[in-house]
Every structure is written in structure tokens, then in C-alpha cells.
Image: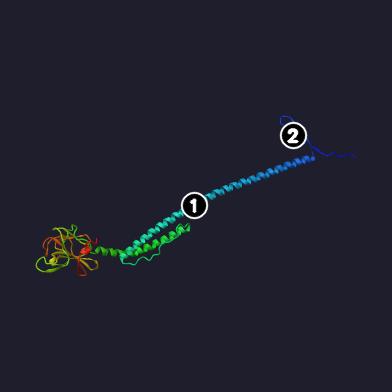
Amino acid sequence: MKRKRPARYTLLLAKSGGGSRAWNLPGWALLALLGGLLLWSGANLYLWHRAREVRALEARLHALSQEARRLSLALEAERAKNGALSREAERTRKELEALKKAIDELRRRAGLSPINATPVRYQEGAQGGGAMAAWTEVEAALLDLKNQLAEVTPALERTLEIEESLPLGLPLRGYQGVTSPFGVRKNPFGPGWEFHDGLDFSAPYGAPVFATGSGVVARVGWMGAYGLAVLLDHAQGYQTLYGHLSRAAVRPGQRVERGQLLGYVGSTGRSTGPHLHYSIYRRGVAVDPRSYLASR
């Protein structure tokens, strides 16, 4: 019986332009070659697919890195903004504390009790909500001070009106000294002693005389020993008298302000020469004007 020979295969490679080469291969070698080609192709396809995934991951990682950088810069900007807000809130808080002290002083002058306001407090350097909480407290304190100021304004205006009405300062601009003081003095017109209820100021004839406080003209005219005189009514029971005038510049019932012209120096009434007699009365009782002269 004749033995069957194994099949063989010829692999022919032809070169363009001429020439070729042939290999005789057994079947198992051809199968091995084809299997190797398939494995090589599969490996390349797998590696290409993995490289594509890596490139996609690298692109995603780059995008995430850019987003993280943007968020980091935004966070730093927000922190800086919150820090600026906190510093501004602290500066405003200090200004409010100073304003509170000023209003306390105004309330004291107006005869009101001190402000019972809660001071503004917050954690310095707080971030995020801390800065907003600080501004919320500042705004609350500001509203409280505005309410307090609304309360103190009328009383303060009344106090300032009273202060402006009090007889303070000199009735003459060109002050030339006191020629006769307040109190008991030797009678300039004869023997004995008498009580002098004001001050006599040396002044030339016709020198202007000014109100030492705002008020209402109570009387204008001849007033006995004071000659031609002006009497003003002020707040808190005060009155001032300006005597021995040569001429008056106001009329009864007229409202006058501190520093307003009342008349001119003369020598009318019981007088030895041109001068101004100036008296201050508190609830009808004469008081020494000297303690009121240097009050302005």
C-alpha cells in the first residue's frame, strides 16, 4: 500500500517590475504564519484602542486640571474679597463706636440718658459667611444709632437754643475795661455807698452795643437811672439790661440773636460820661456779669 505524502504549500512573493521568490511550506507552517499574523494584528488593534483611551483620559485630565485651577483662582479671589469686606466692616465698626461716643456726648448735653446700644462684635478675619455676618451686625448698629440720633435731635436743638439764649460774652466788640464793678461801691454822685447791680464798661460815645444772647426785647425806653435802655428776656429766667444808650436799634417784642445790634453807647440817665451799664438778672435777682463774660 502506497504511503500518502503530507500536503505542501507554495508562498510566492512577486516584485514589481520583475523578479519573484517562492517558498515551499508545509501546512502546519502556513497555519502558524497565519496565526502569527492574526495575533500581531490583534495586538496592534488592542494597543491602538488602548492608546486612544489614554489620549481621551489625558484630554479629560487636562480639562479637569484647568477647571481645578479656575476654581482655585476663584476661591482665592473670594477669600480676598471676604478679607476686604471684613477689614471694611472692622473700620466701619470703629467709626460707629466713635459716632456712638459723640452721640452720647450730645445726649448728655441734651439731658438724655446714654445710649444703651449693644457694641458691634464679630470674629476678625472670618471668611465666607463671617464677613456677611459682620456687615449684618454693622447695619443693625447703624440703624440703632440712626434711631438714637432721631431721638436726640429735638432735645439737642432745644438745648442748643437754650445755650444760644444764655447771656454769654461781651456786649461790646471794642472792650476797653470795667470802670465800675458789680456790688457795693462808693456813690459817684455824693457821699455814702450804694449797690451797683451790674458792670460799667468804658466805651466811646456812639460805640455799638450787641446782645450777649438770643432772646426777645422786653422793654425799650427810659428806665430811670439807666436812662435810655434795652431789656432782653432770655431762656431759663435770664434777663439782660443795656443802659445809658444814646440810641436804640430794636423795638419791644422783637426777636434778636446773639451778636445782634441793640443800640449805641451814650450818657443818658444817671451817668458821669459815655459808658455802657450792663446787668444780668436771674429770675429777677441781679448776678455778677463777670462770670459770664469769658464763657464764649
Q: Which residue is rendered at x = 38% and y = 63% of the image?
A: 144
Does residue 155 show up?
no
Report the mark closest to the observer, 1 or 2: 1
Give the total of numbered labels: 2
Could you give the CA–CA distance between mark 1 and mark 2, rounded to whole angstroms? Answer: 69 Å
**Residue 225's spot in the image, x, y percent?**
12, 66
How many other residues sit within 10 Å of disc 2, few (<14), some (14-19) or many (≥20)? Answer: few
Give the quadrant of the N terminus. Answer: top right
**Residue 132's spot in the image, x, y percent?**
45, 58
Q: What residue is disc 2 on?
A: 13
**Relative to the observer, which residue lies in front, 2 or 201?**
201
Q: Amino acid at mark 1?
A: Glu
User: Are the residues at dot 1 and dot 2 in contact (C-beta closer than 8 Å)?
Assistant: no
How many other residues sit within 10 Å of disc 1, few (<14), some (14-19) or many (≥20)? Answer: few
Q: Amino acid at mark 2?
A: Leu
Q: What residue is disc 1 on?
A: 76
